[in-house]
Image (cartoon, helix red, strand yellow):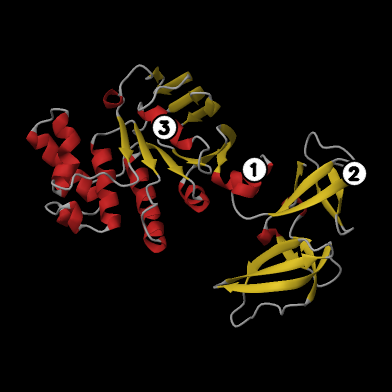
Amino acid sequence: MWEARTVSGQALILNGITHRYGGSLAVDNVTLDIKGGEMVALLGPSGCGKTTLLRIIAGFIRQSEGAVMVGGNAIDALPPHQRNIGIVFQNYALFPHMSVAENIAYGLAARGETRAAQQNRVREMLDLVKLTPMADRYPRQLSGGQQQRIALARALAMRPSILLLDEPFAALDKNLRLDMQIEIKSIQRLAGTTTIIVTHDQEEALSMADRVAVLSQGKLEQFAPATEVYDAPSSFFVNTFVGASNVLDGVVRGVDGGQAQVRLGDGSDLSAPLPPGIQQNARVKICIRPEHLMFSEGAGDLDGTVALGMPLGSSVVHEVRLGDGTAVKVAGPRDAGAAPLAMGTRVSLRPTHATSVRLYPA
């Protein structure tokens, strides 16, 4: 029986990693200090450098500059098979002619472990991923979720210092994807393996990772706990890429005690914390998440007209047109039996809290 044990994963440090493909800069001076046993997500749009970083860690490509260190030791000179790094690919890459047990034992056999040691480890891994009855089946006889768990078991069987997951849920439907995210997070916690997951799915990164590294055009935009990335995004890119956000244009008309008074295009004013580097009369981008706006029974900060209402199960989203035609979304819980506000309803809006409004240089 598999039992929870102490953290076995080792710390991973990416120190000033830069990589070029010809004249194109794919990764630009990225530094990450990842703790042993931590799960970190590399999150960003296509072409941001996250897959290149994964391949550099695995040893499939050699970076142009910088160093990769595992457990305090540089591994840049080691080939992939000597790095003790496990990988679960997007397509799982199971051997179709091998049974589940044979797939899991493959790396152990290649490493020269005894048949008895292989069998013990296979039993341990099948117990871990809760697929012991499937030992004699072949990949074609398994569901997508089962194949994924076997691919994970095969990677963990080698007792890797680092586990790499490359878009592991992309091929699964939405309901199964959520189940497998919970499953793999639980397995990773039990195994204690330092894990890097590459994804472009924001919800996946925020729900699974202890910390999230947000990448854009090869640069590291923010590396922080998932809640901090969402609640306190460090840049305009992070704010608009991670989660939904209303973006308004404005001008700082006054500063008082760390608060900025911002004039919007429709002539209304909003108060927001003043970030460093922004001064009076500066043009700014204002970001407010839909769930951080609420309808005001009295006078609000923003006045507009409901253009659309969409019930989404337990929540409801309204699109409101402000006086200058700018559209903003307002999200909130929906009471049982309640319908969205009718189109054309005049409403006033205000932020749920002063810190809900964030400013960035225009």
Number of numbered discs visible in the structure rendering: 3
Q: Which mark is residue 14?
A: none
Residue of label 2: 256
- Residue visible at 66% across and 39% down in the picture: 234
> Mark 3 falls on what kind of element?
loop
Circle 1 Cα neighbour tier, 10 Å, few/some/many (<14 / 14–19 / ≥20): some
Measure the C-alpha gap from mark 2 to mark 3.
44 Å
Amino acid at circle 1: Phe
**What x and y, as percent, mark residue 270?**
84, 54
Q: Which mark is residue 36?
A: 3
Residue furthest to the left in view is: 115
- Residue visible at 49% across and 23% down in the picture: 22
- Residue visible at 57% across and 38% down in the picture: 224
> Mark 1 falls on what kind of element?
helix
Residue of label 1: 237
**What x and y, as percent, mark residue 7?**
36, 35
Between discs 1 and 3, the one toward the N terminus: 3
Residue 336 placement: quadrant = bottom right
